[in-house]
Image (spheres, helix red, strand yellow):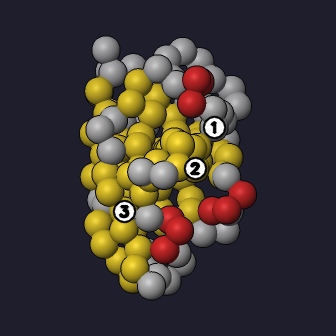
Amino acid sequence: QVQLVESGGGSVQAGGSLRLSCAASGYTDGCMGWFRQTPTKAREGVAAVDSGGGTSHEDSVKGRFTISRDNAKRTLYLQMNSLKPEDTAMYYCAARYGGCWYPRLGLDDYHYWGQGTQVTVSS
């Protein structure tokens, strides 16, 4: 069984930065990703990393967000810079069981989910 616990969310002004962390237990050698959701918008993929360290970022965050993983610490990160009010959302960490050789941003690609951490960006 995989358990995921996110941290690092908070409130920040536009242009600021936050770093989200996701501490994982159990099998986490496959793909992992960050997703976000608001009360009025469905959950969407933000960034993903595959088993070999390859990454993918959703277009609206490219150049601002960076996903990374530390396998020794079993931790996934999302560095978020130049934050915008439209980045306000609940952010979720996700993990896929099994080998994964390209980063995936689809909801159905993941088997395990964390409880989320809130990010609020004010203008």
- Residue 85 coordinates in the image, percent (x, y): 49, 74
Judging depth in this view, the residue of 104 and 75 nearest the camera is 104
Mark 1 and mark 3: Cα distance apart in space: 20 Å
- Residue 98 coordinates in the image, percent (x, y): 54, 15
Residue under label 1, please give it.
105
Query: Which badge, 3 or 2, is on the more N-terminal residue?
Result: 2
Q: Quadrant of the N terminus?
A: top left
The answer to whether one can see residue 77 in this image is: no
The label on residue 119 is: 3
Confirm or deny contact between disc 3 and disc 2 (CB under 8 A): no
The label on residue 46 is: 2
Question: For residue 89, which quarter of the picture?
Answer: bottom left
Question: For residue 112, which quarter of the picture?
Answer: top left
* Circle 3: residue type: Val
* Circle 2: residue type: Val
Bin the neighbour count of mark 2 within 10 Å (Cα to Cα): few under 14, some 14-19, many 20 and up: many
On screen, 71 above or below 77? Answer: above
The answer to whether one can see residue 14 in this image is: yes
Mark 3 and mark 2: Cα distance apart in space: 13 Å
Mark 1 and mark 2: Cα distance apart in space: 7 Å
Q: Secondary structure at mark 2?
A: strand
